[in-house]
Image (tube, rainbow, N blue to C red):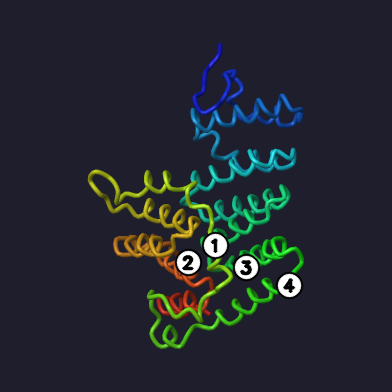
Amino acid sequence: MLVCICAAPAVIWAEDLSPESINSLLQAGDVASVDRAIDSIRGVLSERPEIARGQIRSWADALRGLKRFDAAADLTTTGVTEFAADIGSIESLLQLRIRILLEAGRPKDALRTAKSLFNVSRMETTAMAIRQVAECLNAVSGGNDAPVEQFRQEQLAGATPPPEATSRPTTTAVAASARSSILGQIHPDADSYKIAIRQLDPRSYLFPAAHVPDLLAVGNLLLVSDRADEALAAFTQAGKIARVDQMLAANEGIARAIKAQDGTIGRANAWVRRISPRAP
């Protein structure tokens, strides 16, 4: 029996929509099998997303190994929207996307993704994101050390909270001297996430709702899209209505949005210390 999947450009066998069949096609490795696997992945994402969800990263990595870079990169973007509430999965998918784009000879796109990773990364994984930005800057500059060194100096300077944040930590943006001019010049792809943000945002419903998990997910996608001010508003609203067990995620989101606003960690760290005096 044949099933036509609208998301795919070709008619797909129904049994091709199982993860096992897709894995077998990818393992075959020939062009026809991989093309069929890609069509099947599109189909299962449309028809059975709950099954595809757990396979997205491994399929993207397999396509990367087969040098089907465009399909692999597209799949990581889909994965970020599917795992919008899961920071660890977002970080993993963005790191994989960077590797894919660098191997595909697209360092500028890799750098844009690295900026997204810096924005959305957890405070404890920010050092990893900084290394990814530096690697991509080096790839874009073709061995010119100046941009990487400037970025390093900005991060060192920005690690110290500005005086106004030290005396009274705030979510209000600070002077340009406390920000990263290098990151300020990098503009991630925002269009890929617009629809998902609109669909997830409980504030856009016909009867607007205040749903903390959705606000947190929207905030993450806004950070990936480099819309830090809007992300800060979403996390702040989530914090106002969060239960006790949701407060940590909301406050961490506020810190990440501050980090994304500045492109440095000083003011974000000051915010963390303000709400958690025991923080180092």
Where's residue 186, x and y in %?
A: 56, 63
Question: On the image, which quarter does residue 181 sit in?
Answer: bottom right
- Is residue 103 left or right of 250 when viewed as pictured? right
Residue 145 badge: 4
Q: Tags 2 and 1 in contact by the CB under 8 Å rule?
A: yes
At x 38%, y 52%, the residue is 213
Label ID, residue 130: 3
Using a 10 Å C-alpha cutoff, classify the residue at mark 2 as few (fewer than 14 neighbours), some (14 to 19) or many (20 or more). many
Answer with mark 4 or mark 3, whichever residue precedes in sequence: 3
Q: Amino acid at mark 2?
A: Arg
Mark identifier at residue 256: 2
Q: Secondary structure at mark 1?
A: loop
From what the image shows, is residue 69 above or below residue 31? below
**Mark 2 to mark 1 CA distance (whole Å):** 7 Å
In the depicted structure, whether residue 141 falls above or below residue 159: above
Residue labelled with disc 1:
121
Q: How many residues crowd mark 4 within 10 Å: few (<14), some (14–19), many (20+)?
A: few
Of the numbered discs 1 and 3, the one sitting upstream in the chain is: 1
| CA separation in Å, label 1 and label 3 | 10 Å
Q: CA distance from mark 2 to mark 4?
A: 28 Å
Q: Residue at x 73, y 49 (%)?
A: 103
Q: Residue at x 61, y 23 (%)?
A: 16
Q: What amino acid is labelled 4 in the image?
A: Asp
Q: Element type at marker 3?
A: helix
Kind of residue at disc 3:
Ile
SS at mark 4 in the image: helix
Is there a contact, CB below 8 Å, between mark 2 and mark 4? no
- Residue type indicated by callout 1: Ser
- Taking depth in this image into account, of 276 and 127 the one nearest to the observer is 127
